[in-house]
Image: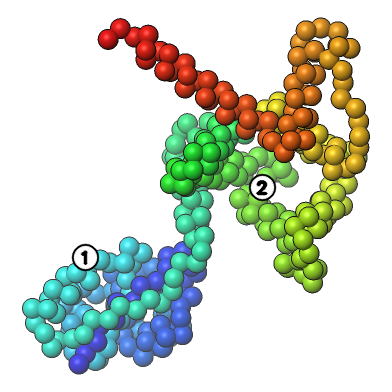
Amino acid sequence: MPRIVLLVTSPRLPAGLLTATAWDVVRAAPVLAGAESELVTALRVAGAEVRVPDGPAVPALLDAAAAHKTVVWLAGPAGDESLARELGLRLAREPGQAELELMYGSWDPPGARLLDAVAVLDRLLSPGGDPWKRAQTHRSLAGFLLEECYEAYDAIAAGDTDALREELGDVLLQVVLHARLAEELPEGERWTVDDVAGGLVDKMVRRNPHVFADAQAGSLEEITASWERIKQAEKSRDSVLDGIAVSQPALALAAKILERATRAGLGVPLPSPQAQPDAEAVLGTALLTAVSEARDAGLDPETALRRATLAHAEAIREAESTSRPS
């Protein structure tokens, strides 16, 4: 019985990158397509017979199948579901004309939708795109980056993995948006999202020799120590405190500084509240002492204060509800 092969390919791979089975069928049978494309050109260059029918696709496919026993329809990026449905109904009404076969010539690789994200942001920031986004700078977007990270943190704290997926998308938006803006920097300062991704890949390979080289994994503590040694060699920093983000919340900043000092074996005494010159300094040193005590107890002071604050906020809401007139 004649055979009609619907060949589906990934639009996110280079044209012509097909499986061996797909190449065998397009070289052995005529290929029809709905429109000219890079893939059509690639197949023709490789010697395949490809044509775009002038009239309706279904009759053209049935005629080609009857004449050649096998014909291939090169499906578009959306998979040509309407054509497949129409063809399937036609063959169901008139059995015996041909068999319909679905063949995947290529699949989206993991991370393929990241290419779509880059393409969408490029469109939005190109001439004729979104005026608001085109007017932004790294500095004007800085607050949004923090806000999206906090919202992702909230989703993690709430244990809401669906919300986390969405919020990480918003974080990704900021990453791709900043990378696209960097393409507009002056010559010599420009960088792209590929530079961001490439730097990340190189860093992960360097800092995980137990995975990508011949180093032994050892314990988690040994892996962490190896990471820090490699990081220190890369950064050539003068202090164990170099690289700490000083704009993070004060409790988290205090905990990070104390952690770095402890890891380096530096037993620097905490300042005494009684020796401070004013009330604000007294309060600051008292809070620093509280952070140190929390770390000694294995607690995260930022999380602890957040938990206590949110519990108090709930108590305020309850007080509001009971004070409203019924």
Graded by Cα atoms within 10 Å as few (under 14), some (14 to 19) or many (20 or more), the crowding at tag 1 reads: few
Q: Nearer the viewer, residue 39 or 75?
A: 75
Mark 2 or 1, nearer chain start: 1
Q: Nearer the viewer, residue 157 or 90?
A: 157
Residue at (81, 58) in percent of width and height = 222
Q: Is 293 left or right of 186, judged from the image as shown?
A: right
Query: Which label sits on residue 82?
Result: 1
Query: Which label sits on residue 191?
Result: 2
Q: Is 79 left or right of 111, judged from the image as shown?
A: left
Task: Work out how far the residue at label 2 is from the one at label 1, CA to CA, in angstroms.
Answer: 42 Å
Amino acid bearing label 2? Trp
Amino acid bearing label 1? Ser
Q: Looking at the picture, how far across and down is residue 247, in whole percent?
A: 70, 29
* Quarter occupied by residue 323: top left
Q: Quadrant of the C terminus?
A: top left
Count of numbered labels shown in the rendering:
2
Q: Quadrant of the N terminus?
A: bottom left
Q: Secondary structure at mark 1?
A: helix
Residue 38 seen anywhere in this rendered image of the structure: no
Q: Nearer the viewer, residue 74 or 287?
A: 287
